[in-house]
Image (cartoon, rainbow, N blue to C red):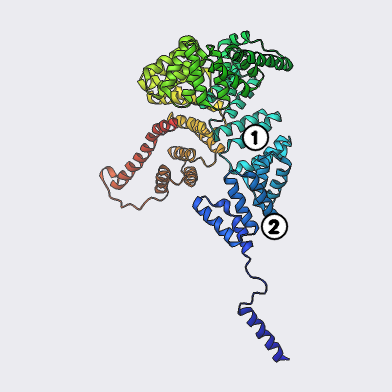
């Protein structure tokens, strides 16, 4: 019996040690699928191609190969083909989350929301992908399932910090849920991710309009106009605000920029029926007339106007082109044609149309303006200047265009022309905060501090939350050593933004320099409360504790500053000074004159110099911080 047992044990060992697989041989298709699941981490294109080729070679007919095929079809824009491949993947590997997620994204792209939500939810049950969260959030938001949409947007926002659309989606939800404060917060996050986001600028401005804060809304829209000068929504909202403020000229001007200009001559010449059936009848009548008189330019003009009024852009373009082909002398035809081309993003064609409008009517202010805006958006500033100048000859009371000219002159470093244009802005619109701030900066560059102060103060009086004007004023006051004025400005900044740790830190610095140590401590502590790892505030508070002899507190605070930012040299120096106080080196006692030791004199002088040097550093600290 023992011999049999021994034999069986030896046989088992032999089988295990001689390569017998027991059915556990490596599965190349399984390995290929695992490799396919990591393709999203590959950033180099050459590496990606190599990895994909390896996956296909490893399992050419398996789910992994179909997955790679789907990715490649997506890259070339063959989305229907990619969908079929992802479906084949899931037939062979139903639990492969990446295939489900990618398929869900494609379904969402095609508007198949029900199918998309199923696949995206299936994928997210296995892996967390910000793009899947974002797509699912959009679907839930469209279905007004706001709690789920909010959850998925927030999950996406954890990683997609530079994707403005995520924060815009959240803002839309909060707006629909009547939570304007939260919506404002998300719009601001969107602007942090994309300063040129027109939707964010319009969203913030809309909330201000709803609250009756028209000036704040205009200020926001002007910033948006600088970032995206061609955006029609911005101009239309500005037109609405100016109309509410009773400024008909600026309302008309921004309506024009928003694409809603309706020249009186055009409307009068073409009696467009108000109802759809009437328009259709008029169109049929005009077509019949054109058959009888194919060279009658006026008939094509009228047909174009009716099509445009009916929002039939393609037909309107064709009718206007026929009128242009017959050398129409009506500048409105070319302006309307240019506007329609711009709607289709055919900017070169729009330029040609506007030029023809100017050629038949050099006094066409709208054509000059639109040409100027296109030149400006393309960075052709000299051409923009020419067109804006022609526009201003016809409509001089246009502060927004004077402002655009001024900014062009600033970019081209033509200070004299820029000052002239800014002054024109202020002639027509003296309470324009942007113009006051920007002309102040020019005066400061020229060394005319008195005028710079005048306009910075005016800008701040118009908008108390103008941080640029406030920072510039503080910088001037620092140079002039006007510390009381600095204190007033910094107190206002703290009142306006009580949750900003930087403002409390700056106020603490000025209190510190003025030797108002109690208030300095309060400001520094408030800054640290708002941002516990604020190395500058911790360092400043530790330095203040040293100056007032509170060494143990100084040591604790400075060590926290060192932990927050190990690279701060001043913190290390201050800590070393404290250690010298706590751990004095043994000194050799040598009697000098009047019974004092030479060593003690030297040590006393060294300590005095260290303290003195620390105190002198405060003004520089204030100056450098203010600039930031």
User: In the image, residue 372 lies at what x, y percent?
Assistant: 47, 20
Instruction: Find residue 16 and report its image quarter.
Output: bottom right
Do we see residue 217 in this rendering?
Answer: yes
Residue where numbered disc 2 is placed:
92
Q: Quadrant of the N terminus?
A: bottom right
The answer to whether residue 22 is above or below residue 429 is below
The answer to whether residue 101 is above or below residue 258 is below
Q: Secondary structure at mark 2?
A: helix
User: In the image, residue 369 lies at what x, y percent?
Assistant: 50, 17
The answer to whether residue 2 is left or right of residue 414 is right
Q: Quadrant of the C terminus?
A: top left
Q: What residue do we see at 71% from left, 55% from top?
A: 91
Q: Which mark is residue 560?
A: none
Disc 2 to disc 1, C-alpha distance: 36 Å
Q: Secondary structure at mark 1?
A: helix
- Name the foreground residue: 202 vs 58: 58
User: In the image, residue 304 lies at what x, y percent?
Assistant: 61, 17
Instruction: Find residue 8 and report its image quarter.
Output: bottom right
Q: Which mark is residue 169?
A: 1
The answer to whether residue 118 is left or right of residue 300 is right
Instruction: Find residue 451 and report its image quarter.
Output: top left
Q: What residue do we see at 38% from left, 50% from top?
A: 584
User: In the image, residue 184 lies at what x, y percent?
Assistant: 62, 29
């Amino acid at each position: 019996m023992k011999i049999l047992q021994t034999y069986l044990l030896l046989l088992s060992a032999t089988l295990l040690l001689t390569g017998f697989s027991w059915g556990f041989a490596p599965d190349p298709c399984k390995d290929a699928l695992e490799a396919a699941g990591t393709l999203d981490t590959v950033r180099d294109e050459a590496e990606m191609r190599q990895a994909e080729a390896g996956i296909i070679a490893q399992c050419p007919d398996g789910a992994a190969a179909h997955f790679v095929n789907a990715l490649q079809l997506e890259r070339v824009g063959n989305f229907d083909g990619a969908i079929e491949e992802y479906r084949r993947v899931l037939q062979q590997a139903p639990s492969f989350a990446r295939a489900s997620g990618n398929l869900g994204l494609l379904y969402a792209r095609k508007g198949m929301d029900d199918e998309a939500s199923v696949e995206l939810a299936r994928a997210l049950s296995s892996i967390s992908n910000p793009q899947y969260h974002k797509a699912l959030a959009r679907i839930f938001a469209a279905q007004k399932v706001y709690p789920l949409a909010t959850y998925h947007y927030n999950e996406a926002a954890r990683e997609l910090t530079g994707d403005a659309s995520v924060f815009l989606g959240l803002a839309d939800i909060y707006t629909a849920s009547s939570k304007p404060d939260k919506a404002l917060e998300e719009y601001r996050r969107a602007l942090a991710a994309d300063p040129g986001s027109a939707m964010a600028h319009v969203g913030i401005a809309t909330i201000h309009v709803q609250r009756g804060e028209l000036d704040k809304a205009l200020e926001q829209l002007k910033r948006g106009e600088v970032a995206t000068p061609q955006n029609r929504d911005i101009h239309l909202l500005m037109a609405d605000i100016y109309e509410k403020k009773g400024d008909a000229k600026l309302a008309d001007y921004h309506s024009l920029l928003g694409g809603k200009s309706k020249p009186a001559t055009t409307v009068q010449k073409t009696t467009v029926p108000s109802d759809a059936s009437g328009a259709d009848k008029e169109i049929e009548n005009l077509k019949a007339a054109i058959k009888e008189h194919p060279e009658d330019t006026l008939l094509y003009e009228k047909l174009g106007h009716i099509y445009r009024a009916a929002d039939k852009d393609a037909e309107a373009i064709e009718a206007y082109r026929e009128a242009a082909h017959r050398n129409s002398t009506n500048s409105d035809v070319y302006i309307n044609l240019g506007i329609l081309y711009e709607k289709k993003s055919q900017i070169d064609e729009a330029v040609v149309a506007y030029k023809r409008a100017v050629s038949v009517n050099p006094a066409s202010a709208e054509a000059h303006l639109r040409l100027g805006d296109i030149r400006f958006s393309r960075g052709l500033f000299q051409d923009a200047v020419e067109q804006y100048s022609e526009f201003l000859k016809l409509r001089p009371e246009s502060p927004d265009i004077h402002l655009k000219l001024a900014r062009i002159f600033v970019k081209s470093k033509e200070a004299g022309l820029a000052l002239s244009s800014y002054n024109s802005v202020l002639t027509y619109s003296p309470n324009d905060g942007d113009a006051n701030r920007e002309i102040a900066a020019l005066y400061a560059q020229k060394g005319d501090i008195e005028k710079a102060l005048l306009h910075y103060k005016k800008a701040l009086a118009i908008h108390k939350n103008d941080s640029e004007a406030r920072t510039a004023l503080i910088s001037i006051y620092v140079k002039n050593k006007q510390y009381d004025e600095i204190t007033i400005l910094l107190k206002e900044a703290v009142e306006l933004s009580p949750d900003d740790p930087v403002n409390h830190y700056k106020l603490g610095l000025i209190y510190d320099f003025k030797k108002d140590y109690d208030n300095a401590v309060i400001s520094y502590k408030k800054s640290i409360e708002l941002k516990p790892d604020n190395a500058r505030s911790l360092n400043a508070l530790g330095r203040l504790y040293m100056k007032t002899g509170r060494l143990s507190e100084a040591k604790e605070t400075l060590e926290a500053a060192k932990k927050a930012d190990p690279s701060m040299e001043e913190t290390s120096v201050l800590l070393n000074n404290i250690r010298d106080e706590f751990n004095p080196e043994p000194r050799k006692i040598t009697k000098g004159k009047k019974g004092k030791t030479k060593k003690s004199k030297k040590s006393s002088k060294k300590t005095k110099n260290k303290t003195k040097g620390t105190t002198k550093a405060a003004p520089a600290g204030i100056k450098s911080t203010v600039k930031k």
